[in-house]
Image (cartoon, rainbow, N blue to C red):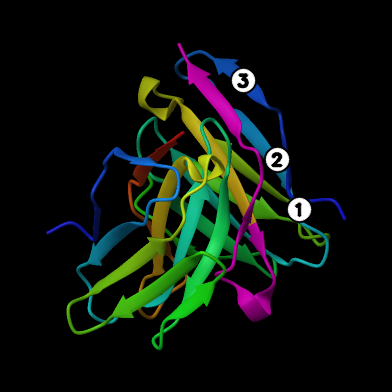
Amino acid sequence: RKEVEQDPGPFNVPEGATVAFNCTYSNSASQSFFWYRQDCRKEPKLLMSVYSSGNEDGRFTAQLNRASQYISLLIRDSKLSDSATYLCVFREAGGFKTIFGAGTRLFVKA
Amino acid sequence: DAGVTQSPTHLIKTRGQQVTLRCSPKSGHDTVSWYQQALGQGPQFIFQYYEEEERQRGNFPDRFSGHQFPNYSSELNVNALLLGDSALYLCASAHRGRRYEQYFGPGTRLTVT
């Protein structure tokens, strides 16, 4: 089983839609979860950390389900500017290594 | 407030050559990590430096080495380049108190011919 798995998409949604991505991880001891976004040919940028209790930042909501070993990202009221690749990231248990998923591509269309 | 900077932006090398990539962390950051990103993939962790020491290495051969300087800047060296080393090399910095909230530089795109 891969360390981390993401649906590569692409997800094609209209403006204003709600879209959700999941990311599963294989090591139950993994810690420190994040979502990054990466625009085409640009560097990844931290979108938000993911806390056990779930957290929200404006239109974005992140959740962690340790029992099922996945994190999720929900985007409400999608904007054209949300078009990007969304990368899930977590820290390997007991170390400093961070592991990135391959990313989920989102296209928001007018 | 300067962000993470990397140099050079692009580089073309021949198989067997050696390359050095450079990274200056964001102001106030003391931890630097290096990643390799192939097209269509997520960044792959190469190693992390803190207090001038390599803290952990990913699944990369010894041809990949690094260094962190007292001013927290860092270098990534790759020896005996292979065609498969062609990729975007990203540097990310963080503050030791929030080590996993990383800020990335724009990357160095390395092409090996």
Say the numbered circle drawn on residue B73. 1
Q: Amino acid at mark 3?
A: Leu
Please state the chain letter of the residue tagged with numbered disc 1 in the rendered image: B
How would you rate the neighbour count of disc 1 (Cα within 10 Å): few for under 14, some for 14-19, many for 20 or more?
A: many
Check disc 2 and report the residue beneath it: B22
Q: Is residue A38 visible?
A: yes
What segment is highlighted magenta in the picture?
B93-113
Say the numbered circle drawn on residue B2. none
* SS label for mark 2: strand
In the image, residue B112 sits, relative to residue B71, either above or below, namely above
The residue most toward the right is B1
Are tags 2 and 1 found on a single chain?
A: yes
How would you rate the neighbour count of disc 2 (Cα within 10 Å): few for under 14, some for 14-19, many for 20 or more?
A: many
In the image, residue A90 sits, relative to residue B90, either above or below, namely below
Check disc 3 and report the residue beneath it: B11
Q: Is residue B66 left or right of residue A5?
A: right
* SS label for mark 3: strand
Q: Is residue B63 visible?
A: no
Residue B49 placement: quadrant: bottom right
Q: Position of residue A75 (x, y in %)?
A: 43, 59
Sequence-earlier tag: 2 or 1:
2
Sequence-earlier tag: 3 or 1:
3
Image quadrant holding the N terminus of chain B, namely bottom right
Q: Position of residue B23 (x, y in %)?
A: 71, 45
**Distance of label 3 from label 2 (alpha carbons):** 12 Å
Q: Is residue A92 left or right of residue B48?
A: left
Asked whether A27 or A6 is in front, the reply is A6
In the image, residue A53 sits, relative to residue A73, either above or below, namely below
Point 61% across, 32% down: residue: B108
